[in-house]
Amino acid sequence: MPRHEIRPGRAVAGLVMLALAGGYAADAAGVWNAPWTFFLPVFLGGLWLAATVTWLSYRTRRRRRTRKASAEASATGSTRVH
């Protein structure tokens, strides 16, 4: 199986959407009586959280890539001058 990049922001967004679907299902079944105004902040907060996690993972991957490139350049002794 080919390896792929981990996307934690998508995982967070998926979990939030599953929680919202569960809330709507519980409300439709009559198990939980939640006002519709409850779901909007949860939805928007979940999107904000997913965006934040995506941004943090991007910054982490970028920093690792930069460090790896720097370590490889210093190990080979190459110096690039622009």
Image: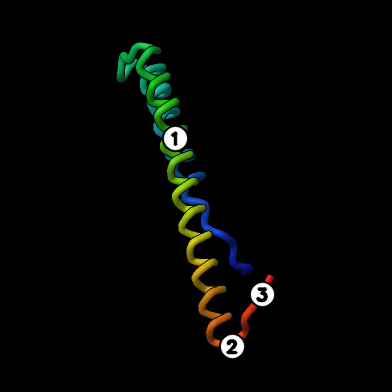
Label 1 SS:
helix
Residue at the spot 51% in from the left edge and 44% down from the top edge: 10
Q: Residue furthest right?
A: 82
Q: Circle 2: is it few (<14), some (14-19), or many (20+) Cα within 10 Å?
A: few
- Whole-angstrom CA distance, mark 3 to mark 1, is 52 Å
Residue at the spot 53% in from the left edge and 74% down from the top edge: 70
Q: Circle 1: is it few (<14), some (14-19), or many (20+) Cα within 10 Å?
A: few
Residue at the spot 45% in from the left edge and 28% down from the top edge: 21
Q: Hey, which quadrant is residue 31 in on the image?
A: top left
Expressed as whole percent of the image width and height from the top left, the position of residue 5 reads 56, 60
Residue nearer the viewer, 27 or 80: 80
- Residue 76 numbered tag: 2
Q: Which quadrant holds the N terminus?
A: bottom right
Residue at the spot 44% in from the left edge and 41% down from the top edge: 52
**Mark nearer the N terminus (1 vs 2):** 1
- Classify 62 as above or below 79: above
Label 2 SS:
helix
The type of residue carrying mark 2 is Thr
Q: Residue furthest front?
A: 82
- Whole-angstrom CA distance, mark 1 to mark 2, is 49 Å
- Classify 45 as above or below 55: above
Label 3 SS:
loop
* Residue denoted by label 1: 18
* Residue denoted by label 3: 81
